[in-house]
Amino acid sequence: NALGAAQTLRGKYSEAVSNLEKADTIYVKHQGRYGRNSMLTAYNLGMAYTNVGEDREAERLGVVLCRGRSSDCSTAMRVGLWERFGQLYHAAGRHADAEECYLRAIEVERSSPGQVSDETNARRHKPLVRLYAETDRLDKARRAFAVVVKSGFRKLTHLSRGEMLVAAGEYHAALDSLSAALLREQVDRNPLPAQVAYIWLLIGRAEAKLGDPNARATLHRAAAMYKAAVGPNHLHYARALQTLHEHFPAGNEHLVEEAARIVRRAADKQPKGL
């Protein structure tokens, strides 16, 4: 379990799934499905499945954890799963489902014993800012962004602040935060390739909004890095292609069909709803 969780953090998703499946089998055999270690392994395995596109398997474990015996499933697990499914639906363009999952994550945390910290509240509202901004619900985006700013904006990482500032239309400030995030990744001995690609994607978006002539090259770079990091059939790569076409449609018409192909291929693997 520990090895699989560590491999997930380092982006070695296939190896993580293999080791976590072994751990899950062992723990269920000796502790049952609702044993403490069984539940923790199921959570890690569900997360790992989403990283390799096995979303139906992830949904099966998600149902166990989210709708099973709540006394055996920690608040952190349930919140994490709702957020993860929200990310899945968000990436697939299922915005209504994504919004429901993000809001459920917030509700589960608010209804649990204990006080929710400002920093945690800010982190939970981050994906809503992006979702609302991407779907042109700017009033909701601004309200969610206001919660982030009020609750703990200063405590967020450079990357998180950059994400929020891009979504809120504060592009100059976003570039400052994203440049700092990129520098941090560059000095890291083990940078995460997909995260570096995401930073470049955000930089490209901000540059495009500001009319920077470097934006096209930046977005091409982000797409190429995503393709190398996650493969040519991953939804993150499709998102990079869609973003490039959105800002520079001329000469990039073929990207729409390529992105659509990736989304169609992934659709059969998407969970149908919790």
Image (cartoon, helix red, strand yellow):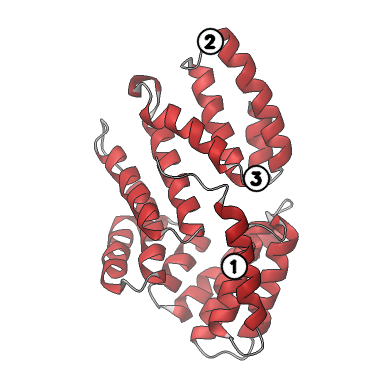
Q: Which residue is mark 1?
A: 260
State the separation of the CA atoms marked 2 and 3. Answer: 27 Å
Instruction: Kindly identify the residue that appears in the image at 68 percent across and 46 percent down.
Output: 11
Residue 235, visible in the rendered structure: no
Circle 1 residues within 10 Å: few <14, some 14–19, many ≥20: some
Label 2 residue SS: helix
Up/down of 270 relative to 185, above or below: above
Q: Residue at x 57, y 73 (%)?
A: 242
Q: Report x, y in % for residue 108.
A: 30, 38
Residue 127: mark in rendering: none
Image quadrant in which the C terminus is located: top left
Give the amino acid at mark 2. Answer: Gln
Q: Residue, x 41% and y 64% (percent of image)?
A: 130
Q: Is residue 18 left or right of residue 253?
A: right
Q: Secondary structure at mark 3?
A: loop
Q: Say whether disc 1 or disc 3 marks the residue closer to the N-terminus.
A: 3
Q: Which mark is residue 31?
A: 2
Q: State yes or no: discs 2 and 1 in contact (Cβ < 8 Å).
A: no
Q: Quadrant of the N terminus?
A: top right
N-term mark: 2 or 1: 2
Say which residue appears at 61% left-offset and 84% top-offset. Answer: 215
Q: Are marks 2 and 3 in contact (CB under 8 Å)?
A: no
Q: CA distance from mark 2 to mark 1?
A: 44 Å
- Mark 1 falls on what kind of element? helix
Of the residues shown, which amino acid type is indicated by label 1? Ala
The numbered mark at residue 52 is 3
Q: Amino acid at mark 3?
A: Val
